[in-house]
Amino acid sequence: MDTFGVVVVAAGRGTRMGTAESKQYLPLGGKPILVHTLETFERMAEASEIVLVVGAGEMERCLDYAVEYGLRKVRVVAGGAERQHSVRAGLKALGAEVEWVLVHDAVRPFAEPAHIIACWQEAVAHGAAVLAVQVKDTIKVVDEGGIIRSTPDRRTLWAIQTPQAFRRPLLEKAHAAAERDGVLGTDDAMLVERLGQPVRVVQSDYTNIKITTPDDLAWAQWYGERNRERESE
Ligand SMILES: Nc1ccn([C@@H]2O[C@H](COP(=O)(O)OP(=O)(O)OP(=O)(O)O)[C@@H](O)[C@H]2O)c(=O)n1
Ligand SMILES: C[C@](O)(CO)[C@H](O)COP(=O)(O)O
């Protein structure tokens, strides 16, 4: 109950970033993006182990990073074709004693430890929880012809982030059911939701972005630099 295991998924290709190098390996303040993400969990006493899921051809490079950056909790495994397959591979590699699992995107390097703990604690209390922020824009449902069909009440809309925290057997059951039913979800909460199990939302920061496109990377460079300046003051 007093620790959790972490699955950090990093086996994507980053097609929307459009760089030759997969985005999780691009430099941010002199280190690969995924190293910043791993360091956050490495420093947290509550994180007992970290399974890093990477492309099959990147395992050696990531093992080298673990040594270079002193990431002693990190083990590296190969991922799959879709994010969901990568999470499943990570889940299988977690130690048998791990009861609570946090799934996190390698390309979210700004998750705050206080929010990570809050998310985990909410899962401990209720079984499943995710970090999220309320949307700031007005969101429309638009049909294929470009016509607005509805405007959902903004007070009910949240942009979902990671980490996403679960009691391990619940997440394993959700993944097994999704595979059996041929369902692919864009996050893990969705797979738990379809079992009819409640997933709680925990308020996060807008700064816990997923670095997806070049403008995200530019913002991350600026934000990382600003944080480093503040730390050195
Ligand atoms: N087969 C996959 C696909 C994605 N991911 C990981 O899931 C996270 C969130 O996915 P996303 O931002 O969509 O990354 P990519 O799939 O790499 O991006 P794109 O969709 O632009 O190709 C990333 O850390 C990514 O590496 C993964 O581990 N395995
Ligand atoms: C899991 C996630 O980061 C929550 O916002 C997101 O759903 C991943 O989606 P993507 O399709 O891989 O960008």
Image: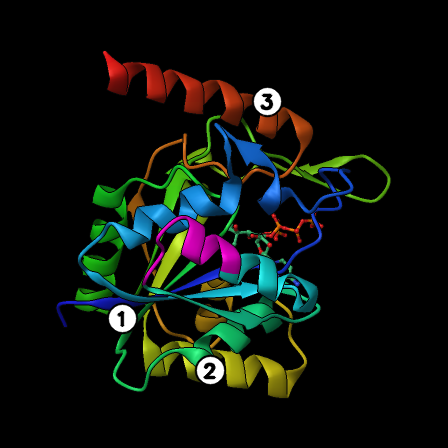
Residue at image point 39% right, 44% down:
132
Give the number of the mark in front: 3 or 1. Answer: 3
Residue at image point 71% right, 68% down:
81
Q: Are marks 2 and 1 in contact (CB under 8 Å)?
A: no
Disc 2: which residue: 92
| x and y, in percent, of residue 93 in the image | 44, 80
Give the number of the mark in front: 2 or 1. Answer: 2
The front one of 46 and 39 is: 39
Could you tell me the amino acid type at mark 3?
Ala
> Coloring scheme of the render?
rainbow
- Report whether 183 appears left or right of 162: right
| x and y, in percent, of residue 186 in the image | 59, 59
Residue 86, above or below 112:
below
Disc 3: which residue: 218
Residue 186 in view here: no
Q: Are marks 3 and 1 in contact (CB under 8 Å)?
A: no
Query: Mark 1: which secondary structure?
Result: loop
Q: Residues within 10 Å of mark 3 (few under 14, many from 20)?
A: few
Q: Quadrant of the C terminus?
A: top left
Q: Residues within 10 Å of mark 1 (few under 14, many from 20)?
A: many
Q: Residue furthest right?
A: 145
| x and y, in percent, of residue 54 in the image | 59, 63
- Ligand 1 found in image quarter: bottom right
Q: Residues within 10 Å of mark 2 (few under 14, many from 20)?
A: few
Q: Are marks 2 and 3 in contact (CB under 8 Å)?
A: no
Disc 1: which residue: 127
Could you tell me the amino acid type at mark 1?
Gly
